[in-house]
Amino acid sequence: MSSSSQIAETWISSFCSILGHEYFAEVSEDFIEDDFNLTGLQSQVPMYKEALEMILDVEPEDDDDDLTDEEDISVSDDMLDNGDRGAAKPDDPYRRSSASRRHQHMRLASDLSVIEASAELLYGLIHQRYITSRPGIQQMAEKYELQHFGVCPRVHCAAAKVLPVGTSDTPGVDTVKLFCPSCLDIYTPPNSRFQSVDGAYFGTTFGCLFFMTYPEVEVGKMLRVPPVLPAAANTIAGNGGAADPANLSSGNWLASQEPTQINGIAASNLAPGLGPGKTYSPRIYGFRVSERSRAGPRMTWLRSRPTDLSELDEVAVYIRDDSEEEGSEIEEDEGGLTEPGRGKSRGGSGGRGVLEYDGYWNSGMGRDGWGS
């Protein structure tokens, strides 16, 4: 195959293929060329224009002639100053051209290193925004399904797949971390080559937004109720068609009683790696170590999860709290609270209600504290 028929590798694909950059998605050039997506980045990146041109593989403007003229002037001045030490005359074309090329090469090399660093920073900040867009999050979903980001190192998470996230949106604060949706915690990547990648290139929004966009993604393994055997079917029929919890394991019974969705999310995706039986309990000779002991576990509540997931249903909790407030207001109105400054209760025809006001709030008592 001729070299002319080969497709030239772009800067973006080359950057993402570097060892340690496997977490990155390839940002489309259409996204980068949209000025709206780059709002506010010019003030954060030095040599912004040159870095953007490098990312988009745009050839920089040809300034060789200007640089050559400037270098010729500087080289001529240096030669005139050093003429008494046997330096070549300024009209020497060979010496002038070679010195000019050497100075120009040194200047371009120093500028190129700065531009490359700026291009990496700019691409990382663009990448942070891209993976929260529709095409970007779809690309990351494909990598997630293929397990490109690895699995959670925690035993009770049962090798749940993880996502790369950052602890800050500001570059230079911390390196990339791995977020586990099963235990809702973050971990340092096991391979050291990822520990030099800036976490700001993935940001703090992507992890949670991903699972809000794809609520149907199965985070962990959920206990399933086994098929009913003939003997068990007879037992259920003898109980009036109701399944006996004693005939089922506690985990399967709870799984069968859980709602399918909580707050618009599948119940099986709500931190399946947490809760009873999903936390390590240290033991000595078979006895559990007390939390009050110096060697005991600390802050186990961080791994807690309610057995009844309906407690997490925010809609049901809101309705229940709202109905309780309305009920308490009705009870107060019917109880007959006295309005301030009056000796007659709101709920009664006069005399004594639940509370009376005779200069003192009391319940059927006089000013001396005893019944009048």
Image: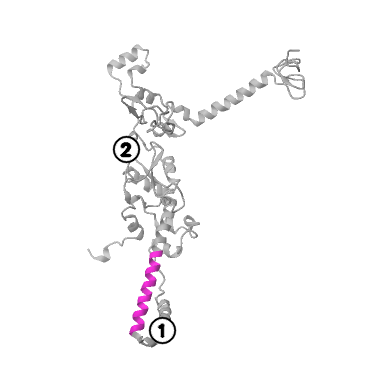
Where residue 232 sits: x, y (%)? 30, 16
Number of marks in the rendered image: 2
- Residue 159's disc is 2
Q: Is residue 223 in view?
A: no
- The residue shown at (64%, 24%) is 329
Picture quadrant where residue 226 is located = top left
Answer whether residue 153 is magenta in the image: no
The secondary structure that most of the magenta stretch takes on is helix
* Nearer to us in this view, 299 or 166: 299
Mark 2 is on which residue type? Ala
Mark 1 is on which residue type? Ser
Where residue 215 sits: x, y (%)? 41, 38
Label 1 and label 2: CA atoms lie apart by 69 Å
- The residue shown at (54%, 28%) is 319
Q: Is residue 89 left or right of residue 363?
A: left
Picture quadrant where residue 89 is located = bottom left
| Front label number (1 vs 2) | 1
Q: Secondary structure at mark 2?
A: loop
Find the magenta span and give its range: 94-114
* Nearer to us in this view, 176 or 56: 176
- Residue 76's disc is 1
